[in-house]
Image: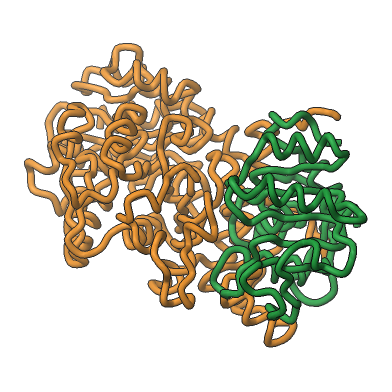
Chain colours: A green, B orange
């Protein structure tokens, strides 16, 4: 599905399909501090019904937001569909190798906003994985569901279709779910 | 896979931000006339207050009708996000509250809307924000005004009054060199005529009261974030780059990236200063904006016809309208505002102050009032009204000398507009 690694733009349909296809997400570099962007992402993705596994080598065995923190990807006892990388580009190749060694293998490698590593992306794609770089899954989910529009953000999505509602007040889902 | 289309301006003016209401199917954006929003549970409430989830808390800070307006204008300007507030002045107050600390400086064009000259020159001074005036006709004055305390450069894309078109790209270069954002008031042009982000602006502000709303029925303003400025580069904008004690230590730029400025204006400036927009006004602005492209083209076409007619009139000594081929700003207008030079023009009347007053009292179709950007044609004598609090020298410097009459040309038949001016000039 993904284009060549030089591709820096992803269509809304591609991003939406990825976020609809995964259920479990490991967030590598998840912070336990409640003011850090990675903490926000763990919380948001958990609220949207994903099984989120925070990965942080310094805090293995602790809990954040009721989720057990694992020191490495290999420690996670359940299959991981997507690895979301919240570390600097220099850490990306090692994390990709760890992901490729998992059984079963994840389907998606996702690098956060500002993070890009073309060689590691090529390696993951050669192994059959889908790669997204330089995007935030919280922003993308918020954009495609319409939630981010409540904050006056330009979602760049025009639609005359009914937004998808999730249970409770002020919770929207991805179109097509 | 298929290429995704980039929607055109007319499509965005109608659709951006406005999906059908999922609860009722209402296709027009509902007026959410409510102060507050029910939380699912305490945890949901905490995540909203902590800026960890998207959603509404309280209409002083956000409202779903207002949010559609914000996304609409952000899309039309080509920005990342926007914040709508109670007036254009409120928008400016919040922008500079987000950028400036006491002792800081703003470089502003000296030819501005008279209200902005007052706001910046007097009210801002009592906050300790000092304005240094510069001349858009001599860009070296902007460079000379830069100091270590400079926090922003502020200009109007088309200046009010008097048809002055500003060289946005050249001033953007000066702002970049100084490491400060360029703030552009795009009220007179609207994004239909000029999109300042395409020329290097970092933040755009509007009085929505004028052409965006377009019908003279609501007061409002908006701040649009271009998403281009690096607020953390030099630590000069601590509200964006430093941990915020109001939010347990969140760094807004780190957390919200390329829409951090709009968020900071909302969760610090609007939250604490309080000039929220009424939901009903947001609805009226949305309705107005749906026809913005049609209206702005007609405004500009009518204004050009009126300007051409005025240049031939015996009682008229000069006409300032950048749409006229001989005008000193015509080349800048062709670059920055190629579809037309807008609705507002000034002219000098033979006989000075008294003649100017006589014209505004003799018109029948034009309305004598202190606004621009209505469907109706409007007229004013700035020297005795909008600019009356300025000294004579300051009036002249801002393009509001005693003989100056300002028009905001409306959408009536242009023959009727001209006939009314003709009888008033002869009266």
Q: Quadrant of the C terminus of chain B?
A: top left
Give the residue at x 17% y 61%: B103
Q: Is B192 situated left or right of B103 in this image?
A: right
**Vertical order, B175 against B275 (above or below):** above
The x and y percentages for residue A45 are 75, 65
Q: Does residue B379 appear anywhere in the picture?
A: yes
Q: Foreground: B422 or A58?
A: A58
Q: Is B159 situated left or right of B104 in this image?
A: right
Q: Foreground: A109 or B188?
A: A109
Total of numbered circles in the picture? 0
Q: Foreground: B394 or B15?
A: B15
The x and y percentages for residue B163 are 31, 30
The x and y percentages for residue B313 are 27, 18
Give the residue at x 68% y 54%: A85
Q: Is A17 situated left or right of B94 in this image?
A: right
Q: Does residue B24 appear anywhere in the picture?
A: no
The x and y percentages for residue B395 are 14, 42
**Vertical order, B327 against B19 (above or below):** above
Image-quadrant location for residue A147 = bottom right
Give the residue at x 50% y 45%: B227
Give the residue at x 44% y 47%: B210
**Vertical order, B193 against A100 (above or below):** above
Q: Is B306 situated left or right of B316 in this image?
A: right
**Vertical order, B30 against B331 (above or below):** below
């Amino acid at each position: 599905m993904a284009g060549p690694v030089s591709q820096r733009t992803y269509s809304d349909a591609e991003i939406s399909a990825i976020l609809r296809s995964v259920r479990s997400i490991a967030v590598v570099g998840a912070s336990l501090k409640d003011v850090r962007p990675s903490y926000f992402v763990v919380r948001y993705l958990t609220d949207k019904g994903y099984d989120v596994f925070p990965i942080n080598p310094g805090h293995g065995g602790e809990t954040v937001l009721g989720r057990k923190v694992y020191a490495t990807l290999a420690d996670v006892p359940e299959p991981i569909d997507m690895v979301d990388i919240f570390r600097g580009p220099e850490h990306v190749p090692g994390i990709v190798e760890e992901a490729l060694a998992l059984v079963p293998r994840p389907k998606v490698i996702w690098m956060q906003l500002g993070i890009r590593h073309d060689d590691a992306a090529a390696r993951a794609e050669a192994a059959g994985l889908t790669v997204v770089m330089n995007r935030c899954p919280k922003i993308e989910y918020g954009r495609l569901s319409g939630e981010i529009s409540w904050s006056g953000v330009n979602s760049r999505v025009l639609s005359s279709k009914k937004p998808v509602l999730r249970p409770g007040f002020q919770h929207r889902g991805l179109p097509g779910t | 896979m298929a290429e995704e289309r980039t929607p055109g301006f007319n499509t965005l003016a109608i659709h951006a931000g406005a999906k059908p209401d999922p609860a009722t199917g209402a296709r027009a954006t509902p007026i959410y006339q409510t102060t507050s929003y029910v939380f699912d549970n305490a945890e949901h409430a905490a995540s909203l207050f902590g800026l960890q989830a998207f959603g509404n808390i309280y209409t002083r800070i956000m409202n779903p009708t207002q949010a559609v307006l914000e996304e609409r204008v952000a899309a039309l300007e080509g920005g990342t996000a926007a914040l709508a507030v109670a007036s254009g002045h409120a928008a400016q107050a919040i922008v500079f509250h987000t950028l400036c600390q006491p002792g800081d400086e703003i470089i502003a064009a000296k030819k501005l809307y008279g209200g902005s000259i007052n706001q910046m020159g007097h009210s801002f001074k009592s906050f300790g924000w000092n304005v240094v005036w510069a001349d858009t006709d001599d860009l070296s004055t902007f460079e000379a005004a830069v100091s270590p305390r400079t926090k922003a450069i502020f200009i109007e894309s088309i200046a009010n009054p008097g048809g002055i078109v500003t060289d946005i790209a050249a001033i953007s270069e000066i702002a970049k060199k100084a490491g400060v954002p360029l703030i552009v008031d795009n009220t007179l042009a609207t994004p239909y005529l000029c999109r300042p982000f395409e020329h290097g602006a970092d933040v755009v502000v509007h009085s929505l009261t004028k052409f965006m709303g377009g019908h003279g029925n609501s007061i409002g303003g908006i701040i649009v974030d271009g998403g281009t400025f690096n607020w953390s580069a030099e630590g000069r904008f601590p509200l964006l780059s430093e941990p915020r004690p109001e939010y347990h230590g969140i760094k807004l730029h780190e957390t919200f990236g390329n829409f951090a400025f709009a968020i900071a204006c909302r969760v610090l400036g609007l939250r604490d200063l309080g000039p929220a927009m009424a939901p009903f006004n947001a609805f009226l602005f949305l309705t107005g904006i749906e026809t913005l492209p049609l209206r702005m083209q007609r405004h500009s076409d009518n204004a050009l016809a009126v300007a051409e007619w005025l240049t031939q009139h015996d009682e008229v000594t000069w006409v300032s309208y950048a749409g006229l081929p001989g005008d000193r700003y015509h080349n800048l207008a062709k670059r920055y505002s190629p579809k037309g030079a807008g609705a507002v023009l000034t002219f000098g009347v033979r006989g000075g102050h008294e003649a100017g007053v006589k014209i505004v009292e003799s018109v029948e179709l034009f309305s004598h009032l202190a606004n621009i950007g209505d469907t109706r044609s409007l007229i004013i004598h700035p020297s005795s009204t909008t600019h009356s609090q300025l000294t004579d020298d300051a009036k002249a410097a801002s393009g509001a000398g005693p003989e100056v009459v300002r028009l905001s040309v409306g959408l009536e038949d242009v023959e009727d507009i001209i006939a009314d001016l003709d009888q008033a000039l002869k009266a």
